[in-house]
Image (cartoon, rainbow, N blue to C red):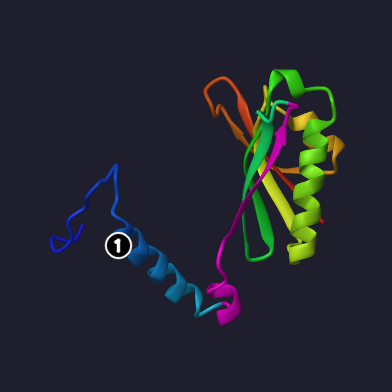
Amino acid sequence: MSKDVIIELSQSPSEADLAVMSDGIKSFNQEHLPDAVVFEPDTRFAVFARNAAGEVVGGIRCNAYWNYCLLELVWISEEARGKQVGSQLIATVEDHCSALGFEYIRTETVSFQAKPFYEKLGYRVYGELADFPKGHTTYCLVKRL
């Protein structure tokens, strides 16, 4: 280890320090990718399902960049499960991503969550993380739009 470098763990990193890292990886990526791809902004969005009272009963949080959309968080309340709400939310995300020119959607799900749901919608497993969380498996899934 270099004596000139100090390693620091931060549980509340500053925006300025995070920007230095982002700019650094963009600079590195520029050697391998066209500028239009390197400097493409993230497309963050969410899709919500609401009940008659206007309360959120489900939703999907997404981050899309390059040619992929990442489903970061998918949640359907107990009252909305089994009523095609999840399928409708996914369809809305897929339509939006297609309209924006994204080609793939990827996500992760844990063995006690929604793997069969995603597979029914055309997602395929491309990786597994055993014992994550302990006693379970995390599945990585992808779908070409």
Q: Name the residue under label 1.
A: 16
Judging depth in this view, the residue of 118 and 2 nearest the camera is 118
For the point 72% across and 35% down, which residue is it?
49
Q: Is mark 1 on a helix, strand or loop?
A: helix
- What segment is highlighted magenta in the picture? 33-52
Which residue is at a point 55% across and 77% down the rendered structure image?
Answer: 32
Question: Which residue: 58% across, 77% down?
Answer: 33
| Amino acid type for the residue under numbered disc 1 | Ala
Look at the image and tell me whether residue 144 can be seen: no
Q: Quadrant of residue 64?
A: bottom right
Residue 58 pos. (x, y %): 69, 31
* Res 106 visible: yes
Q: Is residue 93 above or below residue 37?
A: above
Front in this rendered view, residue 108 or 18: 18
Q: Kindly indicate the quadrant of the structure image that contains residue 74.
A: top right
Q: Residue at x 75, y 27 (%)?
A: 52
Q: Give x and y (percent) for residue 97.
A: 74, 58
The percent position of residue 21, horizontal first and vertical second, equals 36, 63
Q: How many marks?
A: 1
Apparent side of residue 6 relative to residue 61 in the rendered image (left or right): left
Q: Residue furthest front?
A: 53
Q: In which quarter of the image is residue 81?
A: top right
State which quarter of the image contains the N terminus: bottom left
In this rendering, the answer to whether 117 lies above or below 141 is above
Residue 4 located within the stretch drawn in magenta? no
Q: On the rendered structure, is 124 left or right of 38?
A: right
Q: Residue 112: percent from the left, percent from the top?
A: 67, 22
